[in-house]
Structure formats: structure tokens, C-alpha cells
Image: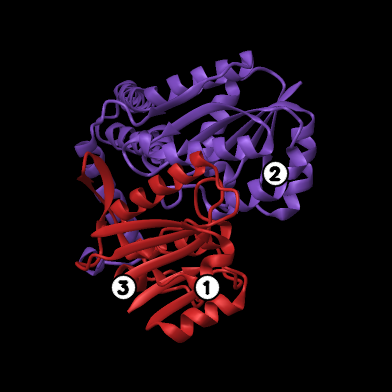
């Protein structure tokens, strides 16, 4: 009997979405028979319903929009409520929000719990991850951006010194520090997705666990978030003094 | 002026509201685009959604209203799909930056004005759990919208036209 991961991102490149990333991480620890289906429109409903009818566990991956479930997920849950009634699945949730505190995902988790009661499914809990956007950004910056920048820096170093070994060493150090920071900052996320995956594999009740970016307090997050939004705005041609 | 979001499919209720109040009424049942989560309302056209439709300025309008009223079916302890679709388009009404308030992080205000948030949930079989969750939703929304006060009411569907907004 399999586990079905339902990702609900509406992003064009859904595989880049944070909730899909977290579903993928959870899937690594959930056992072998896992299937992922994406819910972007009503056209996806039949294949999702068929997958759920053959499943023992359903994992819903979504993001908090304005403090609660996004509208397209509310529609999806309402539309399939009758179709999944009686299949007796266990339901888990992976969700993220933009705020620092993962606890602000609590409303979304409780809404899924209410849906499970109405649909006759077994709600087993889930994880709420704060700083969802930041955890997504560091994936690219620490694993791709910094190594690429490091390669350029190493190349410049080689041009200046002619010593390829020291240039390679420089690049190695930059990459190692970057990856270490990525692992440190994401350690809370990795721990929670591992624990949830294990609970899914064992078909056990999980409860609610909340996490956020590790080794970075709220003030630090605020600092990075400020520059993130300013950088995005400048990229769109909007100067900071026109933010309001 | 009041801003009212209403998802009652009965046009009579909408018409009644239109005729009796100085209000800007959004019929949430009318077709409209969903929020894309592109955040360009924060980083490209501050305060305004980039989707060029009648909801493009609704976020800023709602955050500057004298009262922001929502009339919604209670679905799984929260708003209906139609109301949420319109509410999701309201994020241009706040800033993308964060601040700590009452022990948790919230978005900073875009406007100095503070709204009064009133939510009327309707439904014939709302459970106690859903009722409590709905109150929690409104309280959390009020925090993020920097509302000076918020009120939640639960009414029956057939009594909606009698409610004094």
C-alpha cells in the first residue's frame, strides 16, 4: 500500500516551490512506495482521487496564505471530500509559512484536521515550517550561487598568483563553508522531515511539530528578509524609497 | 467607507447590502483570478496587484476602510474558497517586511490607518471545533492587518439578510 504526496503549489516551476521541496525531503524517509501528484487545477482531480483510493497514507504539501489554507486548496478539499470518504487513509501535512515562527502554520494544520473529520479520514498531524521563503532561497544561494561565485573568485586568484592548487583550495573552502551553513540553517527542517517521514513509514500518529531556520534568531531573519525584499524590488526596477 | 466581501450566491443579499450602506461590496462569487504568489504587489507595483482586474487595488482599499466586513460560509473552520480567493489578493495592503508584535512576527503596516474587522460566518452545521478555529483565524488576520479591533459572528444562512451590518 502506498503513500501519496499531493503537492499544491501553483508556481509555474512547481518543483522549485518550498512546499514541494519539503514534501520531497519527507518522501526520502517515508519508505519505498511513494507517489507524488501535483494539484494545480480541477483537471488533476481524477488522477489524485484514483491515487488516494489506492493509498494507505496521504501527505498534503501546501503553504500558508493569509494565515490559513490557500483558496485553491480549500476548493480541492471540498470538491474531493465525498470522493475520499470511506477510504480510511491516514493524512499527514507538510506546510510552510513566511513568518519566522513555524507555529503560525497551526491554523492550516487544524483546518486539514477539520477536513479529515468531515471526510472520515484519519488525521495524523504534520509539520509547520517557518521562514519558508528563506529556506528556499538558501538552497540556491548556498548550493549553487556561492559555489559559482567561489569558482570565479578562485579563477581570479589563479590569474593573479598562477598557483592552481591554492586557487582550488580557496574554492574548496568557500564551498565547504557554504554547504556547512546550508546544513546548519536547514537542520531543523531536516530533523522534522526525517521524523515525519519515519512516522509515515510506520503509519503512526505524529502530532504537530513546528520548526524554522536554525542558528538564526528572529532578528537575524528580519535582517536577511529586509535585504531579500529590497533586492527583489531593485531587480524589478523599483527603488527602495518607492516601497510605500 | 466600509469594504464588504460577501460570498452569498443569492444576489438579493448583495443587492440589499448595496442599497442600504455606504459600502464598496465585492461579490466573491463573481469570477476572478487567484493570487499567483508572485509578490510583485510588494516588489514591482507596491500596494497594487499586477493582475489587471477589478481586484487589483482591493488590498489597499480594504486596509484603508473604516470597517472591513467579511461574510463567508464557514468551511473547515475558515473562510470559503471564494472569500479566500479575494482575501489572498489583499496582501498588497501590507508591507513585505516583518516586525515583532505580541510575541510573534507580523507584516509591517503599509498605511497608518487601523481598520475594524468584522466577520460573519454562516453555515448550518458548523462544529464547535470549526467555530473555535474560525475565531482563531479572525484573531490572527486582525493581528496581521493591524486591525484596532475584530468581531466574529456566527449566523444561519437564512438569517443573513436580517443582519445589521
What quarter of the picture does the N terminus of chain A occupy? top right
Along the line of sight, the residue nearer the viewer: B145 or B34: B145
Q: Which mark is residue B161?
A: 1
* Secondary structure at numbered mark 2: helix
**In this rendering, does residue A151 appear at all?**
no
Give the labeled residue for mark 3.
B65
Residue name at image x 52 percent, y 20 percent: A206
* Secondary structure at numbered mark 3: loop
Q: Colour of chain A?
A: purple
The label nearer to you, 3 versus 1, is: 1
Q: Quadrant of residue B156 in the image?
A: bottom right
Q: Which mark is residue A81?
A: 2
Labels 3 & 2 near each other (Cβ < 8 A)? no
Asked if marks 1 and 2 fall on the same chain, the answer is no
Local packing at callout 1 (Cα closer than 10 Å; few below 14, some 14-19, many 20+) is: some
> Which chain is indicated by disc 3?
B
Amino acid at each position: 500500500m502506498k503513500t501519496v504526496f499531493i503537492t499544491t503549489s501553483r508556481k509555474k516551476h512547481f518543483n522549485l516551490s518550498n512546499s514541494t521541496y519539503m514534501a520531497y525531503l519527507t518522501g526520502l524517509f517515508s519508505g519505498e512506495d511513494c507517489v507524488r501528484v501535483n494539484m494545480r487545477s480541477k483537471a488533476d482531480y481524477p488522477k489524485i482521487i484514483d491515487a488516494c483510493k489506492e493509498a494507505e497514507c496521504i501527505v498534503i504539501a501546501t503553504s500558508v496564505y493569509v494565515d490559513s489554507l490557500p483558496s485553491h486548496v480549500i476548493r480541492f478539499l471540498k470538491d474531493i471530500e465525498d470522493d475520499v470518504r470511506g477510504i480510511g487513509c491516514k493524512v499527514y501535512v507538510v506546510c510552510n509559512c513566511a513568518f519566522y515562527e513555524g507555529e503560525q502554520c497551526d491554523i492550516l494544520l487544524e483546518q486539514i484536521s477539520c477536513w479529515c473529520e468531515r471526510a472520515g479520514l484519519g488525521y495524523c498531524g504534520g509539520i509547520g515550517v517557518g521562514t519558508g521563503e528563506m529556506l528556499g532561497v538558501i538552497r540556491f544561494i548556498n548550493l549553487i550561487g556561492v559555489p559559482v561565485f567561489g569558482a570565479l573568485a578562485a579563477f581570479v586568484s589563479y590569474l593573479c598568483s598562477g598557483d592552481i592548487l591554492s586557487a582550488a583550495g580557496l574554492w574548496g573552502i568557500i564551498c565547504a563553508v557554504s554547504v556547512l551553513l546550508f546544513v546548519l540553517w536547514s537542520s531543523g527542517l531536516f530533523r522534522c522531515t526525517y521524523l515525519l517521514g519515519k512516522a509515515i513509514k510506520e503509519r503512526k500518529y505524529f502530532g504537530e511539530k513546528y520548526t524554522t531556520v536554525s542558528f538564526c534568531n528572529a532578528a537575524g531573519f528580519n535582517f536577511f528578509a529586509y535585504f531579500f525584499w529590497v533586492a527583489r524590488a531593485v531587480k524589478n526596477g523599483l527603488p527602495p524609497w518607492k516601497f510605500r | 467607507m466600509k469594504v464588504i466581501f460577501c460570498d452569498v450566491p443569492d444576489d438579493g443579499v448583495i443587492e440589499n447590502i448595496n442599497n442600504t450602506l455606504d459600502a464598496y461590496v465585492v461579490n466573491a462569487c463573481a469570477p476572478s483570478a487567484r493570487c499567483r504568489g508572485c509578490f510583485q504587489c510588494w516588489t514591482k507595483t507596491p500596494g497594487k496587484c499586477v493582475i489587471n482586474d477589478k481586484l487589483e487595488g482591493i488590498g489597499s482599499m480594504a486596509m484603508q476602510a473604516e470597517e472591513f466586513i467579511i461574510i463567508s460560509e464557514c468551511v473547515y473552520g475558515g473562510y470559503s474558497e471564494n472569500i479566500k480567493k479575494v482575501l489572498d489578493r489583499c496582501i498588497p495592503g501590507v508591507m513585505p517586511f516583518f516586525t515583532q508584535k505580541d510575541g510573534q512576527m507580523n507584516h509591517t503596516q503599509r498605511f497608518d490607518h487601523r481598520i475594524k474587522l468584522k466577520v460573519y460566518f454562516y453555515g448550518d452545521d458548523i462544529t464547535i471545533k470549526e467555530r473555535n478555529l474560525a475565531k482563531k483565524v479572525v484573531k490572527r488576520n486582525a493581528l496581521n492587518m493591524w486591525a484596532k479591533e475584530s468581531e466574529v459572528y456566527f449566523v444561519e444562512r437564512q438569517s443573513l439578510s436580517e443582519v445589521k451590518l
